[in-house]
Image (cartoon, rainbow, N blue to C red):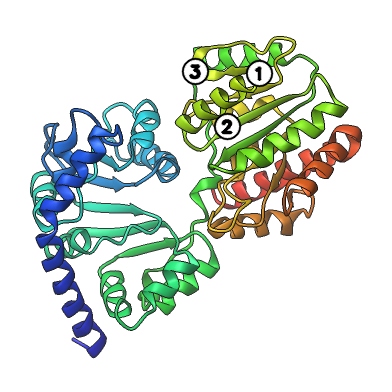
Amino acid sequence: MGVVARKGMLVYKIYRALSYVVSPLLQLHLRWRKIRGLEHPTRLPERLGRPSLTRPPGPLLWFHAVSLGEGMAAIPVIKECVKWRPDLNILLTTTTMSAFEVIINQLPTGVLHQFSPIDTPAAMDAFLDYWNPNAIMLLESELWPNLIMASSRKGILLALLNARVSMKSFKLWSSPVLFPLISLLLSKFSLIIPLSSMQAIHFQLLQAPPFIINFAGDLKYVVEYDASKEEFRSIDDLKVQLGHRKVWMASSIHRGEEEVMLGVHKVLKQVYPDLVTIIVPRYPQHGKDIAQKLQKEGQHVALRSQHQRIVPGRNIYVVDTLGELRHLYRLTPIAVIGGSFFPGLAGHNISEAAAAGCAVLTGYHVGHFSHMLREMQRLNPLSVLQVAGKLELEEAILKFFSDGKVLEARQTASKQAFHALSNDNR
């Protein structure tokens, strides 16, 4: 064992001891999250490694995704596994309630779901002993030390799909204290599939063995439109309600960004009185808060969860539901992707809007999605437009509304760029 590996093992032992000591506090924290509605009301034991389902006999493949975006990226891979290896049992774990609420209805028949165990020795050992997976597929940047080291001890194969590390995490992981631990953890993987060449370089600089790094493209370019007849009928009904009115959408917005979008709405409405602005916050509660505030101000708002219709006189449609965004993009020629207008934010997936043929706009704070943006702009500079704030956003949308040819060129460019990248990833 080399010097770096010995240091990594020392840091891991310290981490393991600390995670053992703080286990009671983490359990109290989980109970507090349950009270606040952030954990499932009846499935909290799963977070401690205690199963709520029976493990079927035979080989088992475990996919672990924390949030909704990672879970959605895992689903096409899971479907391919089911298609080519129907003998495999597949388990998907997620952490957030939002991921569970959407993904549970999209998993293929027979795929099991559990909430992910916290990374304490007791919870992780209990989980691995019960489920005994043959291989584990972690999504993006889920480098949990107890999970990885316990799996390695048990001879379980590890893969990191859509692997990425943010610049902030890369600097942190490269520090003298954490670098040996991260290097040790990466050495336990049999396969790492980075989402870009720059990410591959980052992992090599963190001493991931070069021979385990393979390219397969970004899973977030795989956009599926599976939906029930009721869901398609609901979207088609919204199309009818919108009629020939001017429409634009602000999606995945975070707290504070609604002020930017509503300011733009106010300016646009002066020029186009029948305008409809669709606002899709990142979190449903934020949508309810926005609607409540606007209603107190006397504005006419339609709320998605209340099945309120977009009738004449209603100019703002707030979507406070989950899992519909890729379908809602079909309603609008213009999509502004939020989570990108203030420092500290890190952008959101722009490929779904591009796939739907929207003219795509975003701010400059896009985090690791910068690689997706650059790739699309490389293929066609018109595919994504970045704007610095409210004034530039106003100017861009006014230009699109007033010049149909400019708007159409943007829509065509985004869709063509998406399809080119999507085909490259197949």
**Label 3: how many Cα within 10 Å (few below 14, some 14–19, many 20+):** some
The residue carrying mark 1 is 298
Asked whether disc 2 touches disc 1, contact meaning CB atoms under 8 Å apart, the reply is no
What is the x, y in percent for residue 380? 77, 53
| Secondary structure category for the residue under label 2 | strand
Q: Is residue 367 left or right of residue 15?
A: right
Dot placed on the residue nearer the N-terminal end, 2 or 3: 2
- Rendered image: mark on residue 325: none
Looking at the rendered structure, the kind of residue marked 3 is: Ser
263, above or below 383, in the image: above
| Secondary structure category for the residue under label 1 | loop
Looking at the picture, tell me which residue is in the foreground, 179 or 296. Answer: 296
136, above or below 306, in the image: below
Looking at the rendered structure, the kind of residue marked 2 is: Val
- Rendered image: mark on residue 280: 2
Q: Residue at x 61, y 47 (%)?
A: 423
Dot placed on the residue nearer the N-terminal end, 1 or 3: 1
Extreme residue in the front direction: 297
Q: CA distance from mark 2 to mark 3?
A: 12 Å
What is the x, y in percent for residue 399? 87, 40
Dot placed on the residue nearer the N-terminal end, 2 or 1: 2
Looking at the picture, tell me which residue is in the foreground, 51 or 23. Answer: 23
The residue carrying mark 3 is 305
29, above or below 355, in the image: below
Q: Residue at x 57, y 55 (%)?
A: 369
Q: How many marks?
A: 3
